[in-house]
Amino acid sequence: MTETQLIDGKAFAEKLLSQVAADVAQLKEKTGKTPGLAVVIVGEDPASQVYVRNKVEKTKAVGMNSVHHVLPAETNQADLLALVETLNRDDGVNGILVQLPLPKQIDEQAVINAISPDKDVDGFHVINAGRLATGQEALVACTPTGCMMLLKDRLGSLAGKEAVVIGRSNIVGKPMAALLLAESCTVTIAHSKTKDLPQVCRRADILVAAVGRPEMVKGDWIKPGAVVIDVGVNRIPAEGGKTKLVGDVATKEVMGVAQAITPVPGGVGPMTIACLLFNTLKATKMQWKL
Ligand code: GUN
């Protein structure tokens, strides 16, 4: 039986954050200016509030300026677009993140596409998605960027590997597939209409689960020796009326089969925030032509 290793995303993210912090300090020294990240939240979704609080905290921790806008749930699209436009014009703001999901009266893609592509640190703007798809320099979505860092750290070259991505969202599945393809993997994107998903997963040297269904991926779906990246963050009932976080993969069943797996929590999650600040640094350097 294989000894399956847990990939320590938390430790990797801390290392990345300290590199970003060192770079920020150098930039300040050199230019006399401080990079700034604006985070906008609309409404009171509790999960979003936790994510945003964490983003604000880590922004300050790496020495960047944090601008935090909290708008009421009934905000209309015109008002949100006006705020985005103000942030686009603000020289003190190098990155803009509008937390998703947005309330239903607002067209998410319209808001994303109103963000200046140069400040689009989420990498969700159609220009950045298009640049990624065509192999051009781009700001790339944070979660897939973090997943790729963990995969390359573990495997080195990914060329020729069979990669299966479960989930086709614009936030994770599609950019993840594009990044794997750019590293010369043979990529399959599976989704809710895929026939015989377990059999598709069994061919994966690299399996990325990004569906948002608790412990959906079972142990016997895993090719022995595969590296499994679990992007899911699902809160489920636990003993004593409490709740707990689980991923999209039944981790216990995978132990002894996979080469390595990212745990939930402590795997991909911390990488997402670290990559947001990595992207903000990258955006700042591009804007300042450094
Ligand atoms: N909601 C869930 N994930 C994300 C993310 O990566 N960025 C934004 N803006 N909203 C999200």
Image (tube, grey):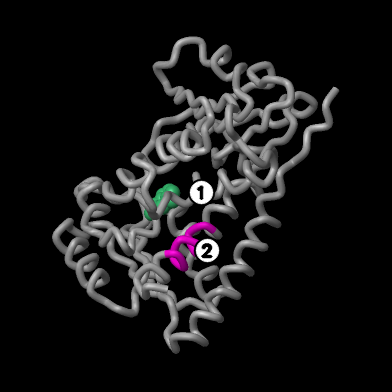
- Say whether residue 279 is magenta: yes
Query: Residue 138, percent across and down?
Result: 38, 53
> What quarter of the picture does the C terminus occupy?
bottom left
Per the rendering, the mark at residue 145 is 1
Q: Is residue 244 visible?
A: no
Respond yes or no on whether mark 2 lies under 8 Å from ligand 1: no
- Residue toward you, 198 or 103: 198
Part of the protein shown in magenta: 275-282
Horizontally, is 164 left or right of 2 in the view? left
Q: Is residue 124 visible?
A: yes
Crowd class of label 1 (few under 14; some 14 to 19; many from 20; radius 10 Å): many
Horizontally, is 275 left or right of 153 in the view? left
Query: Residue 130, percent across and down?
Result: 30, 43
| For residue 283, above or below residue 241 | below
**According to the image, label 2 marks what residue?**
54
Horizontally, is 89 left or right of 249 in the view? left
Query: Residue 270, percent across and down?
Result: 59, 54
Q: Quadrant of residue 65?
A: bottom left
Name which residue lies at 57% across and 24% down. Answer: 162
> What quarter of the picture does the N terminus occupy?
top right
Query: Residue 59, percent across and down?
Result: 50, 70
- Residue toward you, 163 or 43: 163
| For residue 267, above or below residue 257 | below
Mark 2: secondary structure = helix
Magenta segment, prevailing SS (helix, strand or loop):
helix
Say what amino acid the circle numbered 2 marks: Asn
Name which residue lies at 22% across and 68% down. Answer: 83
In the image, which is nearer the foreground, mark 2 or mark 1? Answer: 1
- Residue toward you, 83 or 287: 287
Say what amino acid the circle numbered 1 marks: Thr
Name which residue lies at 55% across and 39% down. Answer: 231
- Say whether residue 277 is magenta: yes
